[in-house]
């Protein structure tokens, strides 16, 4: 893992098509502006992680599920 | 026709045109790119999303609009492009369901990341609604206020 120190107004380049601009730092909030090609997906880590976790749970339960009670509602 | 193995349904034959392709996989299941939809039964809104590759992998899904009539979202341009979406009528929308224990009344739907299928070309994607207020868990049957405090 590469760890860099940056100041507001400075950038990080990843490859030659992704630029991360550090816009501002206020307390414990860091504001980033990201330029990337359309095909590069950008998500807040916790949202993507939450969906991965939920998908794993959704996949782990199915084998003998009985929905009779739900359907008859 | 293709013959696939499933834990729930045993060995089944499916027509090639019934295969739904998730070209980017599903988050946490990126290697799983081909699925087929198998109804739970003929009259219920529940369906299984069965993996072609992994016999034991099947997600339970439902049409969200049955349980959440006001559910709505906007599909981002990237997803529209990735799925080759031309018109809304071509779309089939499902949400994945999770059951925390044995009580099916506790079942929740993931409204934050609906499964969007383009029926025209069978391309599908779990779309993440980055800007919405929806969560990964919404009770299918919200708990009624049994103490009747409304009056």
Image (cartoon, coloured by chain):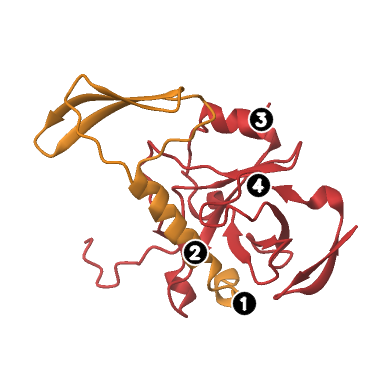
Give the spatial CA distance, label 2 vs label 3. Answer: 28 Å
* Mark toward the viewer: 2 or 1: 2
Which residue lies most toward the right here?
B1
Both labels 3 and 1 in a single chain: no
| Mark number, residue B85 | 3
Q: Chain of mark 4?
A: B
Are there few (<14), some (14-19), or many (20+) residues within 10 Å of tag 2? some
Mark 2 or mark 1: whose residue is earlier in sequence: 2
Both labels 1 and 4 in a single chain: no
Provide the residue designation for mark 2.
A56
x and y, in percent, of residue B32 in the image: 64, 56
- Residue sitting nearer the eye, B20 or B95: B20
- Which structural element holds mark 2? helix
Residue B6 sits above or below residue B36 on the image? below
Determine if residue B60 is in view: yes
Provide the residue designation for mark 4.
B22
Give the spatial CA distance, label 2 vs label 1. Answer: 14 Å
Both labels 2 and 3 in a single chain: no
């Amino acid at each position: 893992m590469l760890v860099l120190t940056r100041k507001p107004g400075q950038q990080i380049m990843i490859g030659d098509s992704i630029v991360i601009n550090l816009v501002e730092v206020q307390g414990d909030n860091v504001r980033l502006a990201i330029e990337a090609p359309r095909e590069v997906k950008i998500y807040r880590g916790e949202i993507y992680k939450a969906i991965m976790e939920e998908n794993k749970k959704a996949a782990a339960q199915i084998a003998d599920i009985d929905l009779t009670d739900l359907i008859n509602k | 026709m293709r013959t696939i193995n499933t834990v729930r349904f045993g060995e089944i034959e499916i027509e090639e045109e019934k295969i739904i392709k998730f070209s980017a996989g599903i988050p946490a299941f990126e290697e799983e790119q081909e699925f087929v939809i198998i109804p739970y039964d003929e009259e219920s809104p529940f369906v299984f999303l069965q993996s072609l590759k992994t016999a034991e992998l099947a997600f339970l899904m439902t049409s969200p609009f049955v349980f959440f009539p006001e559910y709505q979202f906007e599909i981002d341009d990237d997803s529209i492009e990735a799925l080759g979406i031309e018109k809304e009528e071509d779309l089939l929308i499902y949400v994945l369901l999770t059951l925390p224990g044995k009580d099916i009344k506790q079942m929740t739907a993931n409204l934050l990341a609906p499964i969007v299928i383009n029926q025209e070309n069978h391309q599908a994607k779990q779309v993440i609604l980055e800007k919405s207020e929806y969560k990964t868990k919404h009770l299918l049957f919200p708990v009624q206020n049994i103490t009747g405090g409304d009056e």
